Each structure stands twice: as C-alpha cells, then as structure tokens.
Image (cartoon, helix red, strand yellow):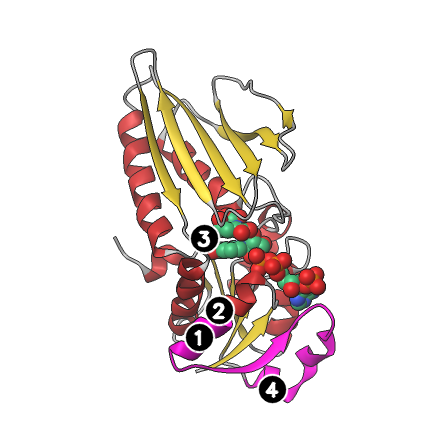
Amino acid sequence: MKIALIGYGKMGKMIEQTAISRGHEIVCIIDIDNQEDFNSPEFASADVAIEFTTPHTAYGNFIKAFSHNVKVVSGSTGWMEEHKADVERMCGKEGKTLFWASNFSIGVAIFSAVNRYLAKIMNGFPQYGVKMEEVHHIHKLDAPSGTAITLAEDIINNIERKEKWVKGTLTAPDGTMSGSENCNANEMRIDSIRRDEVPGIHSVSYDSEADCITITHDAHSRKGFALGAVLAAEYTQNHEGLLTISDMFKF
Ligand SMILES: NC(=O)C1=CN([C@@H]2O[C@H](COP(=O)(O)OP(=O)(O)OC[C@H]3O[C@@H](n4cnc5c(N)ncnc54)[C@H](OP(=O)(O)O)[C@@H]3O)[C@@H](O)[C@H]2O)C=CC1
Ligand SMILES: O=C(O)C1=N[C@H](C(=O)O)C[C@H](O)C1
C-alpha cells in the first residue's frame, strides 16, 4: 500500500524501515519544515498517513490529512484532553477515519488485557491501594504518558473505589522530584520518571499491609511500536471511522 509519513523523528524513521520491510511504498514524508507537501499529489495519493509528531501538532495534522481525504493512523500522545470530542465528531457524522492508540505494541495490548483482568479482581479486595509508574526518555514532552492514562482509565472503569487518576510525582533527568506523593482515597496516582533513553516502562502496583503485586511492561526498543503502527495502517486501509487497538487485536 501507499503510505505517507507525518513526522520524521524517532518513530517516523523506524516506521519507514518497518513499512518498507513489509513491502509498502512511502510516497511522501512531511516534517515540520515542509508543511506545503500536505498539498502535493504524492500526499493525496496515500492510502493511509501515519502520524507521529507532538501533543500540540497532532490534531492540526489530522485536519490537514482529512481535507485531502487521506485516512490517518496516529500514535501522538497528549492531545486527547483538548480534542477528543472534535475527533469523535469528525470520525462519526463527518465520515473521516482515524486509528489512534496511545501504544501500538502487541506486548502492551496483552499487558492491557492483563491490567483489566487484574483490576476486575482487585475490585473485590479494598485492602489494596493502586498506583502507577511510567519511565521514559528525557526528550518526552508529555507526562503522564498516553499509555499510562489509557491503563489508568481501564483501572478506574473496573474498580469502583477509584474515580479518577491524578498526576503524582515527576522525577526530572537530574533526579529532582516535583509534584505530590499524596492523593485522595478515590484517586489513583501516576508517577512519571524521565531518564536517559528509556523507550518506555509501565508498572501498575497494588499494595496492601500484607504484600505488593506489580505488573510491568518494559519495551526493549521502539520496534514493537513501529510494527504495530504499520499493522494498524494495513487494517485502516479496509476499515472506517474511529478505530483503535482493540478493533485490531480481539482477545
Ligand atoms: N502510540 C505509540 O505506540 C507511541 C507513541 N509515541 C508518541 O509519538 C509522538 C512522536 O514520538 P517520537 O517520534 O519519539 O518524537 P520525535 O520528537 O522524535 O519526532 C517527532 C517529529 O515530528 C516533527 N514535527 C513536529 N511538528 C510537526 C508538524 N506540525 N508536522 C510534521 N512533523 C512535525 C518533529 O520535527 P522537529 O524535531 O524538527 O520539531 C520530529 O521530527 C509523541 O507524542 C510520542 O509520545 C511514541 C512512541 C510510541
Ligand atoms: O514518547 C514516547 O516515547 C512514547 N510514548 C507513548 C506514550 O506516551 O505512552 C508510547 C510509548 O510509551 C513511548
């Protein structure tokens, strides 16, 4: 299939390699300094555009791609709070297509299923508190990570005593910590750590007076995210509307 890339950073470059290795053609690459290429015939010829940019540019890129009738797969995080309702409208009544996932790796899809299952069990055991920790590289612009927010939403949907997630502590690359270690009984804390070149570690911990249960997903590299994004593009070529990982992997 014909793929356009929007964003040619760490993920864009890895997706390019993965897409070519699966026999796809990259017809257009748009980064911050060649925005005019959105209006090129090459961009319009793409079956799907794969978008990995920044929290502040993702939504604008969706609009530009939709205006050329190009479907979008996006992994950009940090834009949902502001634009979720608009995107739902565009991909509903207005007939546009966006596949978005906070994390495209197959391992995180499996980890998410385990997270939901464990949360359902923990709903019956109020002696356990729950908190989350995510660790990422020092270049990451958003905190908490999109993956942590998705995992937290799944926990809150399954544990009646938890009503919302809150930002906990943020540990900066120099080791200094800001934010709060405290939260109310109905809140779930997400702590963020920014360190070296870590691709992404997510842990959910349930702690009681007797013991602690922790589940962790630790990405060894960005390859798993890139493969998932290309698989999502293959899926999106033949599907419509607002799509996500649970549409593609059914378990
Ligand atoms: N869902 C998932 O599985 C994953 C999601 N992500 C998310 O993807 C996003 C990108 O990550 P990553 O590739 O590591 O980040 P990078 O910073 O390495 O790459 C982002 C690229 O987008 C470019 N860019 C900025 N603004 C625009 C714009 N308006 N149009 C086109 N390109 C633009 C940047 O250019 P310049 O550097 O010149 O500003 C840069 O080349 C982040 O939001 C991250 O959280 C990351 C990994 C996995
Ligand atoms: O910025 C990153 O690198 C990553 N971002 C995503 C997120 O915010 O969850 C996915 C992955 O953890 C890597």
Q: Which residue is mark 4?
A: 42
Q: Residues within 10 Å of mark 1 (few under 14, many from 20)?
A: many
- SS type, badge 4: helix
Tell me where residue 94 sits by quadrant. bottom right
User: In the rendered structure, which amino acid carries the disc numbered 2?
Assistant: Ile
Nearest to N terminus: mark 3 or mark 4 = 4
User: In the rendered structure, which amino acid carries the disc numbered 4?
Assistant: Glu
Query: In front here: 137 or 30?
Result: 137
Q: Which residues are magenta?
A: 16-45
Give the foreground label among 2 and 4.
2
Q: Position of residue 216 (x, y in %)?
A: 36, 38
**Residue 96 in sight:** no
Tell me where residue 127 sits by quadrant. top left
Q: CA distance from mark 1 to mark 2?
A: 6 Å
Quadrant position of the N terminus in the picture = bottom left
Nearest to N terminus: mark 1 or mark 3 = 1
Given the current orientation, which residue lies at the most extreme top position? 209
Check whether the beta carbons of the residues at disc 1 and disc 2 lie within 8 A of each other: yes
Query: In front here: 137 or 154?
Result: 137
Horizontally, is 176 left or right of 123 in the view?
right
Q: Which residue is mark 1?
A: 19
Label of residue 103 in the image: 3
User: In the rendered structure, which amino acid carries the disc numbered 1?
Assistant: Ala
